[in-house]
Amino acid sequence: MTMKYSNLLSLFLLIAFSANVAFAQSGFEGVITYKTTNAAVKESSSVTWYRKGDKNLMEFNSKGGDYHLQYSMLMGVNDETVYMTSDKGSQEVSGIKGEEIFTAANFVRKATTTESGYNCEMLMFKSNGNDLTYWVTSDIGIGYADLPRLFRNNMPSFSGVASGFPIKMELRDSNGNLLRSQEVVSVEQKKIDESKFRKN
């Protein structure tokens, strides 16, 4: 996997989280879109997530500096390996790790708030002097068990803290400067054709 793909994937890992509790899997079927930013590489991305049962297809469209990348990731909820496709071909990828700044984050506190029209719990973490904040909601009908295992295994633990779905994330340095962000743009519940999840 190239460095650019690795960086893009690390950015998307921010939306997921790890917990040591079990939840009944949601019946949510539809499309969720995100926007992400990464100030360090002047990158912005859009992510479209198609979900049906335990199947997940994520399509990435990222721009930063002098490059523009488009690729997709196909995986089941409990898969350790993802199937990646781009204009450069397709490959199976496994063993992807999240960045230490996120995996080593320590929970600080939570507060109740509203974000993007959803009732949320705002969860605050500290990591290497940075502030990491998630806005988590139960309003969408998606929870921990609905996130692909690859992402659940590589993010701060929400165990005993919250069980909802993160609709927004911000990573800021000690001066309050925004380093990275991710935010849900839209959630559309609808039927997804099985053909969407076929490997090319």
Image: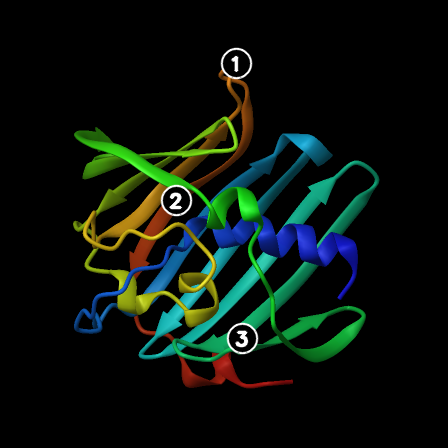
Q: Residue at x 29, y 60 (%)?
A: 19
**Residue depth check, mark 3 versus mark 1: number of the one nearer the observer:** 1
Image quadrant holding the C terminus, namely bottom right
- Judged left or right of residue 44, residue 177 is left
Q: Which percent across, then down, holds residue 198? A: 54, 85
Res 74 label: 3
Q: Earlier in the sequence, mark 1 or mark 2?
A: 1
Q: Secondary structure at mark 1?
A: loop
Q: Amino acid at mark 1?
A: Asn
**For marks 3 and 1 on the same chain, the one whose residue lies earlier in the sequence:** 3
The location of residue 54, given as percent across then percent down, is 35, 79
- Front disc: 1 or 2: 1
Q: Is residue 61 left or right of residue 164?
A: right
Q: CA distance from mark 3 to mark 1?
A: 38 Å
| Quarter holding residue 2 | bottom right
Q: What residue is disc 2 on?
A: 184
Gap between marks 1 and 2, in whole Å? 25 Å
Q: Is residue 174 above or below residue 57?
A: above
Disc 1 residue crowd, few under 14, some 14–19, many 20+, Cα 10 Å: few
Between 69 and 99, the one lying in front of the other is 99
- Position of residue 122 relative to residue 157, above or below, is above
- In the rendered structure, which disc, 2 or 3, sits on the residue that comes first in sequence? 3
The kind of residue on which mark 2 rests is Val
Applied colour scheme: rainbow
Q: Label 1, on which residue?
A: 175
* Picture coordinates of residue 157, whole percent (x, y): 34, 53
Disc 3 crowd rating (10 Å Cα; few below 14, some 14-19, many 20+) is many
Contact between labelled residues 2 and 1, with CB atoms less than 8 Å apart: no
